[in-house]
Amino acid sequence: MTDIHLTQLIEPWFDSSMASQWLTHTVANLIGLCALCLLYLVTRRLVLPSLQNLITRFSPSRIGQLSPQLSKLSGRLSALICCVLFLGFFERVFVAPEWLFAIGKVVGQILLVIISGLLFSAFINLGHGIYQQLKFAKEVPIQGLVQVAKLITFIVCAILSISLLIDKSPTYILSGFGAIAAVTLLVFKDTILGLVASIQIAANRLVSIGDWIQVDAFGADGEVLDLGLNTVRVRNWDNTITTIPTYQLISDSFKNWRAMQQSSGRRIKRPIYIDMHSLQTWSEEQITSKANELGFEIDSAQPLSNVSVFRKYAEHYLRSHPKISKECVLMVRSLAPSEKGLGLEVYCFSSNTQWVPYEQLQAEVIEYLVAKLADFELRPFQAVTGQLKLD
């Protein structure tokens, strides 16, 4: 069957006109352009959004969160449909010189390659959005792998576009990569290191979005906001943002507080220094009287120092505290005497691992025990500095 050009259908409309050929060509080109614009608007504004709304009804909570990715996907799909139809029918619709047809064909093919790459990138974003809804997504982030897939896609699109522009096979362009391999490795050094680091981080679950990490070399101490191919963004506790090269998390050491947050408690480890001049031996009667007064048990079969009795009471206080974890280590131990006096170290774990409740509990415990020293005839050690007030 012989192909029919659009002008053959329009030409009878202008038989009586002196400029029938010019009018026929102009109308054909206008009809072609208007048809492409109308097709794009119908698919972009009507058909694909209707399909998106229909799909969203099946799971509004999950699919509704993917609306930005689906909207971007529908826009690029509409452009792809228009580009394919243009390449398939432009010779039967438009009228132009041969050289302009040749340019239009090359431009259309390049646009098809670029839009295809953008469409594939939109599919990657959609897949990443679906993955982010899974329970283990934060534990195994794939943001770096997604960026690698996009980078490879754009490199392939660039190679195909250049090959179409110079009318050479893609292998012709790839053959020249060997000569510039060293330059390429130098330019993309951070990207290559970041790719390797991203794979190791994802495989070993070293860092996840939302983890509290501490990287002293970069002054980072806060929550991980984003794990990218080249950088990791950390929101510090003072609300500043620190950017760390991804490969630094592999090459250098850092502290991840995730295990503490997932455990049954957060450690409290604070010393209380006692003036050694206030230490004295208590008799059995004194020990029993103090134990009965404060409601704790102690073996008073032999004389003990007042600091020993206080240490036993401190352990009793910690064990009876509702906010102290009973599943973790709990003790009050004596440190080596020093120029600051005799140190008693409070070692226990808070049941609540959140920062503010933890700090409040830690302050509450230490302040209470320091205030209780006087009941055991003990004095806290405090180095005297500054000006003394003399009577």
Image: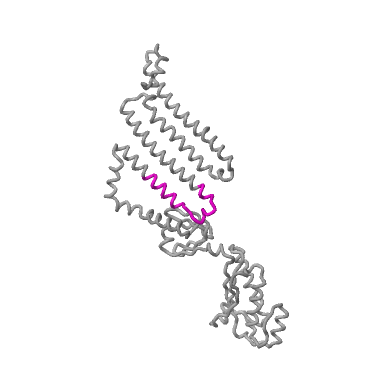
Residue 162 point in image, percent of width and height: 32, 40
Residue 234 in percent (x, y) is at: 49, 57
As displayed, is residue 73 above or below residue 330?
A: above
Q: Is residue 153 magenta?
A: yes
> Image check: 321 left or right of 178?
right
Q: Residue at x 29, y 37 (%)?
A: 167
**Residue 274 seen in the figure:** yes
Residue farthest to the top, as pictured: 16
- In which quadrant will I find the C terminus? bottom right
Residue 266 position in % (x across, y down)? 57, 67
Q: Position of residue 141 (x, y in %)?
A: 48, 54
Quadrant into which the N terminus falls: top left
Q: Which residues are magenta?
A: 129-155
- Residue at horizontal 63%, vertical 70%? 326
Task: Inspect the magenta stretch and tell me whether residue 110 lies in it.
Answer: no
Q: Is residue 245 visible?
A: no
Front in this rendered view, residue 140 or 210: 140
